[in-house]
Amino acid sequence: MAGNVRFAFAWLRTLHFAGVTSQRLNDLSANGARGYSTSTISGDNDMKRKTKFVLASVSAACAVAGIAIATPSLGVLYNAILATGTVNHDINAHAHVALPGSDEGFNAQVETEGAANFIVQDVIFAVGGTTGWHKHPGVLLLSLTADSGSVDWYDANCVKHVYNAGDSWTEGTTLHDVVNSSSTNAHFIVTYIVAKGVNKRTDEPAPSCAAALGLT
């Protein structure tokens, strides 16, 4: 089926991204009200109050109607796309490495059917930050850098897996959420292999099990 991505690993190792340090963030200075009249500032405040009221009304209406609301990311401190590329043909790559003391060695396989985008992302989440519930149209390879805090990774059944600095894992088309519950910023390096021209992420409503854990 076009757009499918399959990874087969006969032997897995934990990957380590050593030597990658957190991006230093520049302090943002607050903008003053110089050049604005009292009436202009008052008008802006009225508009903000009206906007908040409208948003609150929409949220309340959705809750009453039982409409599920998507859960976007929160606490993103830094987000950079380091590289993007396109492969306009199917991929069928295989590798075998003989290992001392192992009859099977290491085998890896990457297969795609249909054009794909390769995307490399560097992203940092603040303490308490969350990716929000979401899916991807392909396969992701993720690693926490050596200076990263730990994260809690939840699947669609709210089963938690803890990943620490230097750990790696994969994600894909199933629903999941990642929370930085540590006392240090969480620093990810992510490689996407996704269907060409499709948004690399789709925000999704939280599953029913999330409310009890405060993951909505």
Image: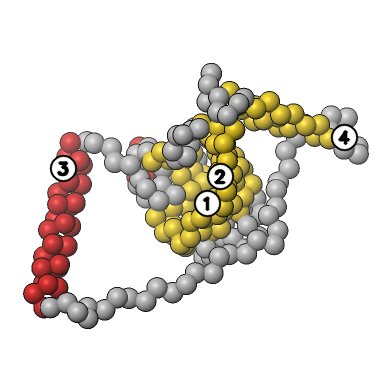
Determine the residue positioned at 14% across, 68% down: 45
> Which is in the foreground here, disc 3 or disc 2?
2
- At a point 60% along the width and 26% down the height, the residue shown is 89
Instruction: Judge whether residue 17 can be spotted in this image.
Output: yes
Marks 4/3 in contact by CB < 8 Å: the verdict is: no
The mark closer to the camera, 4 or 3, is: 4
**Amino acid, disc 3:** Ala
The residue under label 1 is 81
Marks 4 and 2 close (CB-CB < 8 Å): no
What is the spatial separation of the Cα atoms under label 4 and label 1, in whole angstroms? 35 Å
SS under mark 4: loop
Sequence-first tag of 4 and 2 = 2
> Which residue occupies the extreme left position in the image?
39
Quick check: marks 1 and 2 in contact, CB under 8 Å?
A: yes
Q: Nearer the viewer, residue 34 or 174?
A: 34
Looking at the picture, how far across and down is residue 81, in whole percent? Answer: 52, 51
Q: Which residue is mark 3?
A: 61
Q: Specify the amino acid type for callout 2.
A: Thr
Tell me which amino acid carries mark 4.
Answer: Ala
Residue 145, percent from left and from top: 63, 57
Q: Are marks 3 and 2 in contact (CB under 8 Å)?
A: no
The disc at residue 98 is: 4
Q: Residue furthest top?
A: 1
Q: CA distance from mark 4 to mark 3?
A: 61 Å
Please tell me whether mark 2 sits on a helix, a strand or a loop: strand
First-in-chain label (4 vs 1): 1
For marks 3 and 1 on the same chain, the one whose residue lies earlier in the sequence: 3
